[in-house]
Amino acid sequence: MSTNRISIILTSDKREPLQMAAMIASVGAVSGSEVIVFVSMNAMPYFFKNGPEHAPAAGSIGEVMEQKKAPHFMTLFEQAVELGDAKIYPCSMAMDLLEIGAQDLKPFVGDAMGLTKFLDDARDGQVWSF
């Protein structure tokens, strides 16, 4: 059974994977797909209210994206939530490890989710990992 769901696992702290995940989320959401982004590990700080805004490039393409002023990955994630059917869920285990609460996250980030729930929700759709 195929659904119109795109599930994204986001763990990287590098510009290129963050950018690609954001592009898939935003294009998928505005194209009518349900999008679920599960944020964990090194990607978590970018979703903090006062988290870093700059992600280091993993290679030359990341540097070119910066020079050419490509839309910022966080802007794309926010637009995916606001303009389409995207939801961004922080990993509950990562939140516990980092000792942060919902009040520490950007306003467009949803409630914490466990990996078991994410995997269950992602079961019948596309799954991307960055």
Image (cartoon, grey):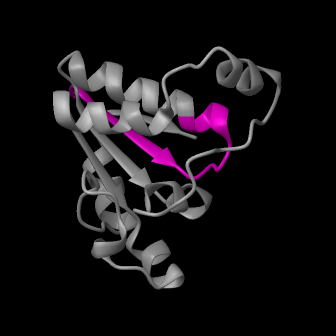
Q: Position of residue 128 (x, y in %)?
A: 48, 35
In the image, residue 54 sits, relative to residue 45, either above or below, namely above
Residues shaded magenta: 1-18
The quadrant in which the N terminus is found is top left
Q: Is residue 7 magenta?
A: yes
- Residue 84: quarter of image: top left
- At 25% from the left and 57% from the top, the residue drawn is 107
> Magenta span has 21?
no
The percent coordinates of residue 48 (x first, y second) are 44, 63
Q: Which residue appears at 63% of the width and 49% of the height? A: 12
Q: Is residue 124 visible?
A: no
Point out residue 104 in the picture as x, y percentages from the top left corner. Answer: 36, 72
Q: Is 20 positioned to the left or the right of 36 in the image?
A: right
Can residue 98 be seen from the camera position used here? yes
* Count of numbered badges drawn on the protein: 0
Residue found at x 28% / y 31%: 79
